[in-house]
Image (cartoon, rainbow, N blue to C red):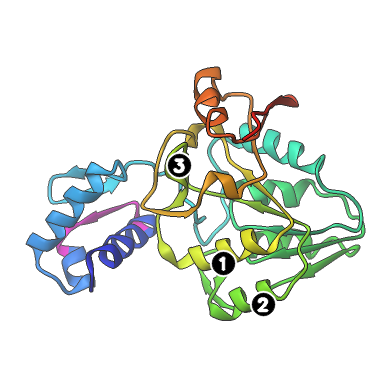
């Protein structure tokens, strides 16, 4: 197993357990304790974990790109609801939209009125929310369940054959240079399919994730038409993204735009 794949496996284990020992990882990945300790050092250097005696804990337990199997109240709920309300202004009757998996897109699903709308999603929590709204046409790509997500090559192929008007993408981190990133590579083909297929691409992401980087980049900033975030984003942080030509909509309908 190559190092990048080991890093992903380590993050997947920690996503589920929150903390882990070297011995556990060594057994799960079938590599030596020395190799695991070297891997943990690399992950700590990237700010993804914190080393503790005999193991490691997640550095950003509130910023995971995948939700736990059981739905729970997310951190920064107020900010996520604010972003979801902003997203609703971009959704109109008869639209064909895609909701990527995540806690902020889940809030969008909760706030959506029961109107004539087509929604594509691979998030089982979002599916559960929208199944109760009979006017919404719910489209679920195929795939195998990984926590709250349905993923796999069949889902990616299916997405490429759709006419999606608007997609709402989530991410673990967003950085002026490294773009949008997540912890594991399993979700990348699906996210990239949503981005390349949709006519308009929105990223919904709270201000706590700005300026940070996770393990794997899945999109550059110039692939995103508009980033929606809450009013907690500082002017200094916003300016870093504006300088890249990124269009932001920040809280309370405040718009910052710089033409490329």
Q: Residue 38 in the image: x percent, y percent?
A: 13, 55
- Asked if residue 101 is among those painted magenta in the image, a careful observer would answer no
Residue found 51% across the figure and 62% down from its top: 69
The label shown at residue 158 is 2
Is residue 180 shown above or below 143? above
Give the CA separation, mark 1 to mark 3.
Answer: 22 Å
Closer to the chain start, of discs 1 and 3, is 3
State how far apart marks 2 and 1 are (Cα). Answer: 10 Å
Q: Would you identify the image quadrant in which residue 88 lies?
A: top right
Quadrant of the frame with the N terminus: bottom left
Q: Decide which of 94, 244 is in the foreground and name it.
A: 244
Mark 1: which secondary structure?
A: helix
Find numbered disc 2 in the image and state the secondary structure of the residue it sits on.
helix
- The numbered disc on residue 62 is 3
Q: CA distance from mark 3 to mark 2?
A: 31 Å
Residue at 50% over, 56% down: 66
* Residue 76 shown left or right of residue 132 in the figure: left
* Mark closer to the observer (1, 3): 1
Q: Label 1 crowding class (10 Å Cα cut-off): few <14, some 14-19, many 20+?
A: many
**Circle 3 Cα neighbour tier, 10 Å, few/some/many (<14 / 14–19 / ≥20):** some
Vertical relation: 54 (above or below) 177: below
Q: Residue at x 33, y 62 (%)?
A: 8
Instruction: Give the image location of residue 94, x and y in percent.
Output: 91, 58
Tell me if 54 is positioned left or right of 208 in this view.
left
Foreground pick, 252 / 198: 198
Q: Which of disc 1 and disc 2 is earlier in sequence?
A: 2
Residue 149: x percent and y percent?
56, 66
- The magenta-colored residue range is 17-23
Give the mark toward the camera: 3 or 2: 2
Q: Position of residue 155 (x, y in %)?
A: 61, 76
The image's mark for residue 190 is 1
Q: Is residue 251 shown above or below 221? A: above
């Amino acid at each position: 197993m190559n190092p990048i794949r080991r890093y992903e496996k380590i993050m997947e284990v920690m996503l589920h357990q929150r903390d882990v020992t070297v011995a556990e990882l060594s057994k799960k990945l079938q590599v030596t304790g020395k190799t695991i300790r070297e891997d943990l050092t690399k992950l700590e250097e990237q700010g993804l974990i914190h080393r503790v005696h005999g193991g490691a804990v997640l550095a950003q337990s509130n910023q995971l790109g995948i939700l736990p199997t059981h739905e729970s109240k997310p951190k920064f709920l107020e900010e996520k609801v604010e972003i979801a309300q902003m997203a609703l202004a971009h959704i109109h009757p008869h639209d064909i939209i895609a909701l990527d998996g995540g806690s902020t897109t889940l809030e969008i699903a909760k706030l959506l009125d029961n109107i004539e709308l087509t929604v594509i999603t691979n998030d089982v929590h979002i599916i559960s929310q929208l199944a109760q709204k009979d006017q919404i046409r719910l489209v679920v790509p195929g795939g195998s369940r990984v926590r709250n997500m349905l993923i796999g090559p069949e889902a990616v192929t299916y997405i490429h054959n759709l006419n999606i008007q608007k997609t709402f993408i989530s991410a673990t981190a967003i950085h002026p240079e490294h773009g949008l990133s997540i912890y594991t590579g399993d979700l990348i083909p699906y996210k990239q399919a949503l981005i390349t297929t949709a006519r308009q691409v929105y990223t919904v992401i709270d201000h706590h994730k700005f300026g940070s980087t996770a393990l794997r980049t899945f999109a550059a900033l110039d692939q995103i038409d508009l980033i929606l975030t809450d009013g907690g984003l500082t002017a200094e942080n916003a300016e870093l993204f504006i300088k890249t030509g990124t269009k932001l909509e920040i809280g309370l309908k405040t718009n910052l735009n710089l033409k490329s």
